[in-house]
Amino acid sequence: MTTQMNSAKPLPSGFTRLRQLVQSRRQPSERCELCNLKLAKNHDHLVEIHRRNILCCCEACAILFTGHVGSDSDVSYRRVPRRFAELTNFQLSDAQWDDLRVPINVVFFYDSTPQQKVVAVYPSPAGATESSLTLQAWDSIATDNPIVEDMQPDVEALLVNRLDRDGDFQYYLVPIDRCYELVGMMRTHWHGLSGGTEVWREINAFFSRLRIASAPFAKESSRA
């Protein structure tokens, strides 16, 4: 449920499983959560739509849920895609950013089927925290950046990084599990009031890897 900024709280317990993805990768023998087959290190994930979980799965099980897009109420799972795109022409003004009222300069947005709207989530020491997102604020962003309409619901996200003080802001279209990898990273490495040097080093390294993995996408915005 979306909450106001001054009462932001960690997301429901279903998202606990999402934060465990980083830790689960270190387990010696992961197994498909549908058929119990032993998994490779780089395996697929499914989003369990209405329980808001991410499941580790083998390719054979993932194929069963490939292409399940849209908002059909009978869809229980969707396969998390592996598309990474850096949106090099993305437009987000300081005024639009301020309208989002996010307390940290990192946030991701995804289209939630259960909530029937776009949801804004930011990483925090307490975990994934949902922030209020007005329809007007999102419509303004979507109008300037039609690429966001290409996001697959529940399984892809717009990830915004505005941490750089020199204005080298980054905007990505990424699989939803990578966003929760970032959430888990902040939760694990945060120390004290400001987080400490370790957490920011890890976050900067995360975005460096993401930039390398992402194909540049320079589709013109509506402002062009």
Image: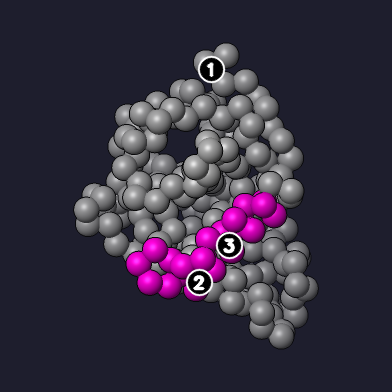
Residue range in magenta is: 187-210
Identify which amino acid the numbered label 3 is placed on: Arg
Element class at badge 2: helix
Residue 195, horizontal then vertical, whole percent: 43, 66
Residue under the image location 62 percent in, 34 percent down: 87
Left or right, 59 with respect to 96, comes to right
Identify which amino acid the numbered label 2 is placed on: His
Disc on res. 222: 1
- The Cα–Cα distance between marks 3 and 2, rounded to whole angstroms, is 10 Å
Element class at badge 1: loop
Q: Is residue 146 magenta?
A: no
* Mark sitting earlier along the chain (3/2): 2
**Observer-nearest of 160 and 48:** 160
Circle 2 sits on which residue? 189
Q: Main secondary structure of the magenta part?
A: helix
Identify which amino acid the numbered label 1 is placed on: Ser
Residue 97 is drawn in which quadrant?
A: top left
Circle 3 sits on which residue? 201
- The Cα–Cα distance between marks 1 and 2, rounded to whole angstroms, is 39 Å
Residue 153, horizontal then vertical, whole percent: 52, 45
Left or right, 209 with respect to 71, comes to right
Residue under the image location 41 percent in, 42 percent down: 118
Residue 159, horizontal then vertical, whole percent: 53, 46
